[in-house]
Amino acid sequence: MEFLPAAAIARLWGVSERSVRNYCAQGRVPGAFRTGRMWSIPADAEKPVRPNARNASSGNPLLARLLEEKESGIRGSIYHKLQVEFTYNSNHIEGSRLSLDQTRLIFETSSISDEGRMLAVNDIIETVNHFRCIDLCLKNARKPLSEHLIKELHRTLKAGTSDSSRPWFSVGEYKQVPNEVGGRPTSAPEEVPAHMTALIREYDPHVPHSLDQIIDFHVRLERIHPFQDGNGRVGRLIMLKECLSNGVVPFVITEDMKLFYYRGLAEWDDERGFLTDTCLAAQDRFGRWMDYFRIPSA
């Protein structure tokens, strides 16, 4: 039997080499085997049929519960907990000064107590907007990830903020001004459209993905840093959406994990364990939430 490398099979199937490796890693290519980092694939292997995204996530009890509780407005539910904990921590990592109790109060009553401190209007607006972003992730959990959805998350997050009044800021569109992340250069504005298109194509949203692949997508997105601001929050929202889409237990990166999270992003190429272990620890915490609310794993 003749065997070909992933690059050759990718050309035959008309997909990215990364997609071919994903198919093999998922056991969807009979006869394929790996030696070190190289895949050997039967030359006559057929391209796996892509599962319908809706069917792939229809058996996810967590997603079903979240959607049900979103519609019914049940308080004290896992949907309620996800909204408050995810929004508080993701915003707090990026500098929001609202407390967890203030975040909860905004979600529950659309009001806020100043607790004797000065409050930034943008912090309040972005908190409300982040709740809507989570709903957007739930609404689109059964659909393949797309550039349109990524831009829509950014547009929703930044709508009505002081940034949205600045023409150069480009809310809901890719950045116009160069930026850095952690002192590191990111994709130049003129490179972003091509880099984002390539990122989505290589990730191949139509096939199932593992936690490691979802994290890898997040790292690559953050290095492109496609938006002027809000990249971290949009990136973490995408991880939530993709976990729900793929039947992977989601997770919330909490404030106390911030330094481990940033270190993991910086050192991903050399040591994936830093970020993976951080996400696994957060995933264990979410798993305990699921146990408490008696939600079985998919």
Image (spheres, grey):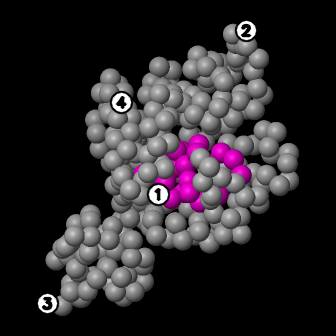
Name the residue carrying label 3: 1
Going from N to C along the chain, the mark reached first, 1 or 4, is: 1
Name the residue carrying label 4: 285
Q: Which mark is residue 116?
A: 2
Going from N to C along the chain, the mark reached first, 2 or 4, is: 2
Report the residue at 47% width, 19% height from top. Answer: 76
Residue 197 % position (x, y): 58, 70
* Side of 44 where 98 appears, left or right: right
SS at circle 1: helix
SS at circle 3: loop
> Toward which corner of the image does residue 117 lie, by quadrant?
top right
Separation (CA) of disc 2 from disc 1: 41 Å
Residue range (magenta): 215-240
> Toward which corner of the image does residue 165 lie, by quadrant?
top right
SS at circle 4: helix
* Side of 14 where 174 appears, left or right: right
How many other residues sit within 10 Å of disc 4, few (<14), some (14-19) or many (≥20)?
A: some
Separation (CA) of disc 2 from disc 3: 74 Å
